[in-house]
Amino acid sequence: MLVLGVESSCDETSVSIVRDGKEVLSNAIHSQIDIHKKFGGVVPEVASRNHVYQVSMIFEEALQEAKVKPEEIDLVAVTMGPGLIGSLLVGLNAAKAFALLYKKPILGVHHLAGHIYANAIEHEMKFPAVSLLVSGGNTELIYMKDHFDFEVIGETLDDAVGEAYDKVARVIGLPYPGGPHVDRLAHEGEDTYALPRVYLEEGSYNFSFSGLKSAVINLVHNKEQRGESVDPKNLCASFQAAVTEVLVSKTLRLAKEKNVKQIIVAGGVSANKGLKERFTKDNTDFEICIPSIKYCTDNAAMIAVAGYYQYQKFKKCDDLSLNAYASLDLEELYEI
């Protein structure tokens, strides 16, 4: 089964063609990082406008790279949310136009389901499983009894972990996007600053990163007030240690409580070396699945794969009235 995936929820325009939920024939991506870098973050209006400029060429590139004709596609899978509404609508309407023109069935896919199913490209997903979903917009712990059976057990109460990384990077003068730069400097420094590990109330699986972020900001500000400076490498190492310790400890605790077969790490922050190392150090009981870096960040291959498994599970598609949603509940969308 050939699935054409379309992803445009933020600032990447991507189209991919995947065979049978496993073989990635193409994964064309146009990133807008260089455009948004000067603003220190993604500007929604600029992002949607650039999707319009790129989307037709990305469709053509994906088909050419896969050596597939449009008529050979069996299913179109497209991100329907959550995300920036203007960006989502560009990809959705392009996917609907393709489906209409070539008379192909279309399926709306939840963006976060896409991140989770990026793991299916290189791993066999085993259930029950716990997924740690970490990105610039989301931080969630999800229990999965089976394919597309999602139960959100914990989530951030304030900042997403990727958002906290970017804000800390900005405070110490690192360029956007800050996460990779913090990760790189963390590996050159040591955990010397006493930063808080925020576990919330006993037994909680929720997360909070605003206090940790504020602690970093206050530390830098207080040093500046005294005419002193922080060591950026040690500060990054200390911040990353505080983040990964909480993320991994809660994930492992939930995995033990649910007696799962697998831990699935997903989202852009799953590319973080410090997070991978913390799992390697602290985990002795579970198989850990983390996608290759090229599938960690937003891409259409993950949407095509999720669309394949979604169709196998529910055996139904959407019609051309399919809409995009800036906010979209994962559990409600796939309520079984």
Image (cartoon, grey):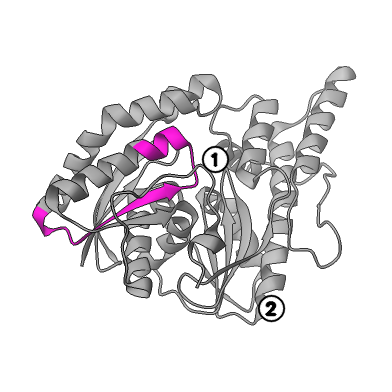
Residue matched to label 1: 180
Give the image location of residue 109, x and y in percent: 40, 56
Q: Mark 1 or mark 2: which is in front?
A: 2
Q: Which residue is drawn at 24% across and 38% down?
A: 58
Residue located farthest toward the right when viewing the structure as drawn: 226
Q: Give the range drawn in magenta.
A: 71-89
| First in sequence: mark 1 vs mark 2 | 1
Q: What amino acid is labelled 1 in the image? A: Pro
Q: In this view, does 87 lie to the left or right of 76?
A: right
Residue 238, picture quadrant: top right
Tell me where residue 194 appears, x and y as whole percent: 85, 44
Q: Name the residue under label 2.
A: 256
Measuring from the top left, give residue 143's x and y in whole percent. Answer: 60, 71
Is residue 29 at all visible to an observer of this figure?
Answer: no
Q: What element carries label 2?
A: helix
User: Callout 2: 10 Å neighbours few (<14), some, many (20+)?
Assistant: some
Nearer-the-camera pick, 24 or 59: 59
Residue 106 visible somewhere in the drawing: yes
Residue at horizontal 29%, vertical 55%? 319
In the picture, measured across the screen, residue 252 lies left or right of residue 37, that is right
